[in-house]
Image (cartoon, grey):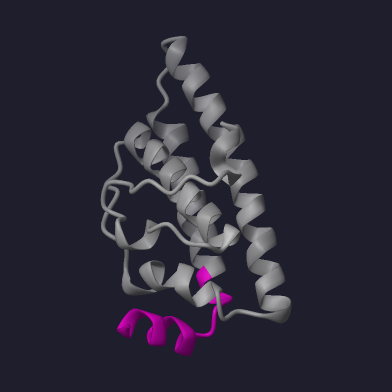
Amino acid sequence: MSNLSSDSSGPVRGHPSALRPAADPVARRWGALHEAAGIVAALAGAADAAPAADIAAFPAALRSLRGWRRTMVEQGIEDIALIMETGIAALLSARESGAPCAAPARALWDEFLAARAGLIALVPSELLQRRALG
């Protein structure tokens, strides 16, 4: 699943505003992560709910993010991409062999949600609020 860090920009069910194509490569990776997360959510039987305002505002806020926070977000997105690539490959392999994969998919989904929350926490709330408002 090496396309997690590619230029994927297609919408994911429930996440259209969070995944609009963006010129920023980090924002595109953010979108690709949500596409991968949609696969994991489906395998887990979890609802892939519409994004909260801060999730939707995140790609636009990235354009204003500088310094150590930007570096941490970039590294965090790369780290999550590697986790998702490995996890999805394992889940799909298990599924192909007939093994149940809902529980491990749920664990990966929960990890994604926690990691995403950590990345969002790195962005100052005023940037997210300003971007969410418009």
Lateral position of residue 118 relative to residue 17, left or right: right
Look at the image and say whether residue 93 sits in the magenta stretch. no
Q: Residue furthest front?
A: 23
Q: What's drawn in magenta, residue-wise? A: 120-134
Lateral position of residue 126 relative to residue 62, left or right: left
Q: Residue at x 69, y 60 (%)?
A: 75
For the C terminus, the image quarter is bottom left
Front residue of 109/37: it is: 37
Front residue of 104/79: it is: 79
Q: Position of residue 128 (x, y in %)?
A: 44, 81
Where 93 falls versus 36 (above or below)? above
Q: Residue at x 60, y 50 (%)?
A: 80
Lateral position of residue 21 relative to residue 4, left or right: left
Where 131 falls versus 49 (above or below)? below
Identify the image quadrant of residue 101.
top left
Q: Residue at x 40, y 20 (%)?
A: 100
Q: Main secondary structure of the magenta part?
A: helix
Front residue of 95/51: it is: 51
Q: Residue furthest top?
A: 97
Q: Position of residue 42 (x, y in %)?
A: 32, 36
Front residue of 82/11: it is: 11
Look at the image and say whether residue 127 sits in the magenta stretch. yes
